[in-house]
């Protein structure tokens, strides 16, 4: 996909430990919970719908 | 300099389209009776050097194999050098690097065709040998990967000298554009099955974006206490498309560059682990369900290069196993097609997903006055090489089904000619993936927490949910059988 390669830049490497230790605990916001739950509900429902369609319409090869 | 050129000429993504289309266009000469690429080197399973490499087309049968390989190298160098020039790469270093990458990759590809490594049971008698590892010629890819890992991890100085030509994403995308034509011909032979595979590709989108992402994000935030800035790119890296998704997400939520870079390093390393493990697991347990195995690779292995590469390996391993165990000879390429289709369906939605995330972050989480998100966001992140793949796929499908239905033989030769270059781009992808996979990173202080989430997500549920969903949607579907 992206053309950017994961090249380890000398500048980026030593920053990791520092970055990790600097990371602050941010409480989960209601909007984040909503994003996660909506995604899962939508995902499972759509998979069910697609499975139904594949069983009824795209049966070739079975 | 490169920055001043239009986007069509300065991105690696677009250049994979141009290179792939050039090879595709030249290969179509066979349809008009003009064989322009028939001199390309095709490597056969061998025990002695004589006859191991020949030009792909009978029209060039008088050409010695060694000349054919040198011509293939010169052609690929010339083609990629044009791209490298427009990409603003250092030409001397690119030419030198490409030369090393090409010849090492070709050497591995050639070695992979050694009879005792590659021969399938039906070939043993013809070669006069009693056994082989039964890995098919695609074993060359695994050898190339191991060679790359060896150089990348133990000779970092040598690997650094090849940096200009260490471009696995460019090589694999070019190969995918070329591969579209071959898959178009296959689809023409079984349009119903191809349609079913494409339809099931939609499931991959739902799974990657709505299920994987949500679970990984929640785990990273709730149990590992990652900040939003780290959790979102990490969730995208593990669940969607590896490097590119991590970078696109990082940009969408305005994370600092260090975040996606770190996530990407991890993605590449674990993709190699998956590439080495999963195809062999699939061969062991899924050879009765080849299409499940193909879809599983597309859904579980991160990064385009590793996913499509694992599709190629699983295709050869399962065909060899099915032939040895059950005497069933599946047609080549259907598992690879399933893995590629699944992966590309995931890819094309990265732009839309990053747009959605940008919208949520911008309006709900990290509000900044006056900031607006535009639809241009989607196009900027759309993987352009997919356009090349769709073009070559549809062109050959239409040619075989509608425009020139009697062109079967010429179309097959055209795709075979393209294929000689496609497999070499694949081999270079494997070698260069190895070059950039720095396993020492795993031992780097501080990466443990990041790696723990990745490890738990990937091996704890992503590959198993991927397997379950692949099973639900693909079990019972078989690739066409040779002569069937």
Image (spheres, grey):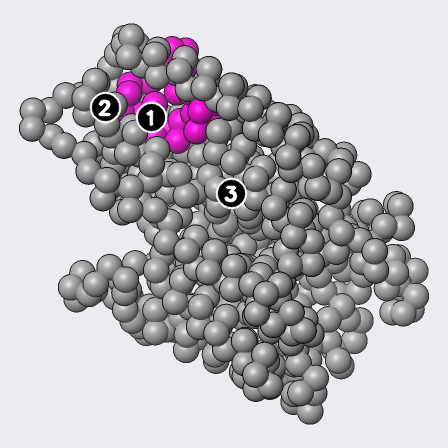
On screen, residue B350 above or below B449: below
What count of labels does the image hold? 3
Confirm or deny contact between disc 3 and disc 1 (CB under 8 A): no
Confirm or deny contact between disc 1 and disc 2 (CB under 8 A): yes
Same subunit under labels 1 and 2? yes
Q: Is residue B54 visible?
A: yes
Residue at image mark 3 = B343
Confirm or deny contact between disc 2 and disc 3 (CB under 8 A): no
Q: Residues within 10 Å of mark 1 (few under 14, many from 20)?
A: many
Chain of the residue that carries numbered disc 1 in the rendered image: B
Is A30 left, or right, of B484 in this rendering? left
Q: Quadrant of the C terminus of chain B?
A: bottom right
Chain of the residue that carries numbered disc 2 in the rendered image: B
Question: Residue B477 location, x and y as percent?
Answer: 73, 39
Residue occupying the far bottom of the picture: B62
Residue at image mark 1 = B232
Residue range corresponding to the magenta coloring: B209-236
């Amino acid at each position: 996909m992206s053309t950017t390669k994961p090249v380890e830049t000398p500048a980026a490497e030593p920053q990791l430990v520092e970055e990790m230790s600097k990371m602050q605990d941010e409480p989960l916001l209601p909007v984040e919970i909503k994003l996660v739950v909506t995604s899962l509900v939508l995902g499972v429902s759509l998979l069910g719908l697609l499975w139904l369609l594949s069983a009824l319409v795209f049966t070739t090869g079975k | 300099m490169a920055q001043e050129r239009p986007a069509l000429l300065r991105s690696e993504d677009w250049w994979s389209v141009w290179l792939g289309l050039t090879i595709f266009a030249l290969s179509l000469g066979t349809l008009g009776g003009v064989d322009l690429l028939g001199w390309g080197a095709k490597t056969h399973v061998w025990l002695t050097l004589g006859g191991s490499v020949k030009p792909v087309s009978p029209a060039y049968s008088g050409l010695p194999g060694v000349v054919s390989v040198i011509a293939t190298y010169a052609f690929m160098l010339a083609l990629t050098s044009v791209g490298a020039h427009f990409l603003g790469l250092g030409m001397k270093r690119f030419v030198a690097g490409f030369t090393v990458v090409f010849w090492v990759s070709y050497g591995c590809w050639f070695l992979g065709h050694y009879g005792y490594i590659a021969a399938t049971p039906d070939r043993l008698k013809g070669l006069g040998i009693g056994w082989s590892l039964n890995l098919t010629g695609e074993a060359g890819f695994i050898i190339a990967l191991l060679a790359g890992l060896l150089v990348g991890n133990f000779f970092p100085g040598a690997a650094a000298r090849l940096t200009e030509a260490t471009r696995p994403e460019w090589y694999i995308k070019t190969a995918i554009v070329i591969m579209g034509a071959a898959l178009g011909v296959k689809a023409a032979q079984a349009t119903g099955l191809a349609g079913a595979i494409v339809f099931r590709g939609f499931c991959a989108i739902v799974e990657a974006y709505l299920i994987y992402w949500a679970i990984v994000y929640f785990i990273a935030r709730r149990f590992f206490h990652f900040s939003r800035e780290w959790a979102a790119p990490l969730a995208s890296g593990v669940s969607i498309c590896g490097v590119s998704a991590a970078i696109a997400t990082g940009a969408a939520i305005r994370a600092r560059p260090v975040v996606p870079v770190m996530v990407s390093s991890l993605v590449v390393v674990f993709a190699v682990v998956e590439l080495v493990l999963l195809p062999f697991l699939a061969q062991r347990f899924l050879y009765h369900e080849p299409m499940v195995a193909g879809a599983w690779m597309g859904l579980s292995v991160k990064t385009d290069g590793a996913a499509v590469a694992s599709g190629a390996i699983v295709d050869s391993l399962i065909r060899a196993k099915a032939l040895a165990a059950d005497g069933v000879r599946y047609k080549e390429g259907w598992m690879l097609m399933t893995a590629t289709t699944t992966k590309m369906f995931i890819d094309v939605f990265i732009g839309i997903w990053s747009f959605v995330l940008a919208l949520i972050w911008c309006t709900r989480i990290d509000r900044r006055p006056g900031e607006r998100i535009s639809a241009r966001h989607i196009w900027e992140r759309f993987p352009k090489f997919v356009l090349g793949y769709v073009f070559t796929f549809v062109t050959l499908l239409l040619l075989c089904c509608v425009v020139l239905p009697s062109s079967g033989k010429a179309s097959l030769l055209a795709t075979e000619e393209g294929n000689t270059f496609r497999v070499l781009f694949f081999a270079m992808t494997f070698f260069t993936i190895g070059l950039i996979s720095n396993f020492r990173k795993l031992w780097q202080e501080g990466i443990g927490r990041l790696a723990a989430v990745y490890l738990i997500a990937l091996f704890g549920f992503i590959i198993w949910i991927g397997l379950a969903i692949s099973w639900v949607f693909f079990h019972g579907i078989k690739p066409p059988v040779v002569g069937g």
